[in-house]
Image: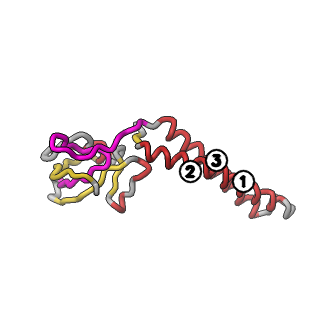
Amino acid sequence: MNNYLTEESINRLREEIEQRKAVTRKEINEDLKEARAHGDLSENFEYKAAKNDRAQNEGRIRYLEKMVKTAQIVQIVKESPEQDEVGIGKRVSITFVEECEAEEFTIVTTIDADPMDYKISIESPLGHALYKHKTGDIVTVESPQGSYSVKIEEISDDT
């Protein structure tokens, strides 16, 4: 699966990587030193917690670095009269054909996705199916729970 990110998203990831390497890593190492000083490591909860924090931090750094390395850079295209198609940064009003139920979503990159705020990733089944389609198109969404159809009612800039 592709990893679509904007330059802004990549910069935010790089900032988090630097924060985790320069600040968080040092804080965790200090916690480890302090916990070691308490003695018996086999029953030292603080030591085990600090080791767990270190593992989580290092895992997150590796994950973020991989996202940056494998990213496909995309541009947020502002709406113009001849370009009415779904893309990153667009607000899309759709109707679920079978249920006649309407929803509105904003298409975003993976790291900006927030389904509770109706921001769906271009990599999600719905986002992927809508991508590059136009107003009036009926598209089939292939999801792990089965396929369904949606009609694109309106596309606008997310402002």
Q: Is residue 135 visible?
A: yes
In the displayed structure image, the side of residue 118 where residue 30 appears, left or right? right
At numbered mark 2, what does the secondary structure look like: helix, strand or loop?
A: helix
Percent x, y of residue 48: 73, 58
Position of residue 71 relative to residue 21, above or below, is above
Q: Which residue is mark 3?
A: 58
- Reading the image, the residue beneath label 1 is 26
The residue to which callout 2 is attached is 16
Tell me which residue sits at (81%, 57%) in the image: 33
> Mark 1–mark 3 contact, CB under 8 Å?
no
Disc 2 to disc 1: CB gap under 8 Å: no
Image color mode: secondary structure
Amino acid type, residue under disc 3 in the picture? Glu
Could you give the CA–CA distance between mark 3 and mark 2, rounded to whole angstroms?
12 Å
Q: Is residue 46 left or right of residue 128?
A: right
Q: Earlier in the sequence, mark 1 or mark 3?
A: 1
Magenta: main secondary structure: loop
Q: What's drawn in magenta, residue-wise?
A: 72-96
User: Can residue 1 be seen by looking at this rendering?
Assistant: no
Relative to 14, does residue 102 appear above or below in the rendering? Answer: below
